[in-house]
Amino acid sequence: MGKITERTDNSKLADFRVHNRGIEKAILGGMRGMAMGHEKKVSGIYEKNRSGGYEQNISEGYEKNVLRPKNVWEEFFADKRSGGHRSSAEEFLSMEAREKLFHLNGGKTILDFGCGAGELLVYYAPEYEKTIGVDFSPSMLEEAGKRIRERNCKNTILILADDKTVWDRLDSPLDRITAAGVFQYLTYQEIDDFIFNASKYLNKDGKIVLFDMLDPRLYPLWKIGLFSQDNSCKKIVSKAICGVRNTISSSIKRRPRDILGYSHHPGKIKKIANKNGFEMICVQSMYYEYKYHAIIFRS
């Protein structure tokens, strides 16, 4: 399998010399640093190991230092009970669900991967004959179960699994496989593997719809407050400098650069889709100005 990303070059840290290059370059350097995903290093090494045939012989040091980000995500979501939407108000969740149902555009069966507490799943259920919610967090699935019972969604089942184990739990093909705000926690290699595996469980006219992907072109701008209604030059510069420091610190400690996960360029996601025999269109998220939706389908 070809390499999706290139390794991060440590020489890029030179871009972050704020005091020597002025405030303007500090902002540009900060945005570039925040947009870069730690997945570049992870996916590059993982891919080499797999193609070289010695994936099982990973050293303890490799697991501890390079694969550590995945443990961070598991620990982070271990006791979470909400999906992290912009608002937990039912009115907002209803609007967000309607947008996503528009892009899902039909089908009779759907799998919501990373369904979290089921905030969107309960809105999908009335529109489908069968809905499946999947998450690796027991606490999230517990909350999802409560919502399902409250809404009397008898056509919905929940599965405790992750992106690697979910496929062994499925017994029939699906019309839609979707995820919302989830793939930012996967590397490019893991996304490639997910789409490859999903293709085996997708009906002929089925779709894979990845909602709310972090856009590396817009997310850094949002993060420094450029889209905020009360922004100012002082606030923007301050947030940019803090972002630079946090990026460098995270790189040194081999931890994720951002708790929201990795940003993925839509062009690279499209290449992965094409590689697996799919076409892809990209549309802007209606309720998250720094995110996009990837709608993947067979040509």
Image (tube, grey):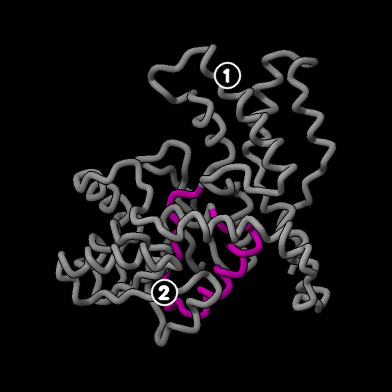
Q: Is residue 272 magenta?
A: no
Residue 31 placement: quadrant: top right
Q: Amino acid at mark 2?
A: Leu
Query: Is residue 267 at all visible to an observer of this figure?
Result: yes
In the image, residue 26 above or below residue 179: above
**Residue 220, numbered label:** none
**In the rendered view, does 264 fall on the left or right side of 293?**
right
Q: Which residues are magenta?
A: 185-213
| Upstream in sequence: badge 2 or badge 1 | 2
Closer to us: 204 or 181: 181
Quadrant location, the N terminus: bottom right
Position of residue 293 measured from the top left corner of the image (x, y, whole percent): 45, 50
Position of residue 8 measured from the top left corner of the image (x, y, whole percent): 77, 46
The residue wearing badge 2 is 160
Q: Is residue 194 magenta?
A: yes
Q: CA distance from mark 2 to mark 1?
A: 42 Å
Q: Residue at x 35, y 70 (%)?
A: 133
**Residue 238, numbered label:** 1
Q: Secondary structure at mark 2?
A: strand
Neighbor class of circle 2 (other Cα within 10 Å; few <14, some 14-19, many 20+) is: some
**In the rendered view, does 275 fall on the left or right side of 221?**
right
Query: Is residue 176 at all visible to an observer of this figure?
Result: no
**In the rendered view, does 14 fall on the left or right side of 232?**
right
Closer to us: 193 or 200: 193
In the image, residue 184 above or below residue 46: above
Closer to us: 173 or 40: 40
Q: Amino acid at mark 1?
A: Ser
Neighbor class of circle 1 (other Cα within 10 Å; few <14, some 14-19, many 20+) is: some
Q: Residue at x 23, y 60 (%)?
A: 123
Position of residue 274 measured from the top left corner of the image (x, y, whole percent): 61, 63
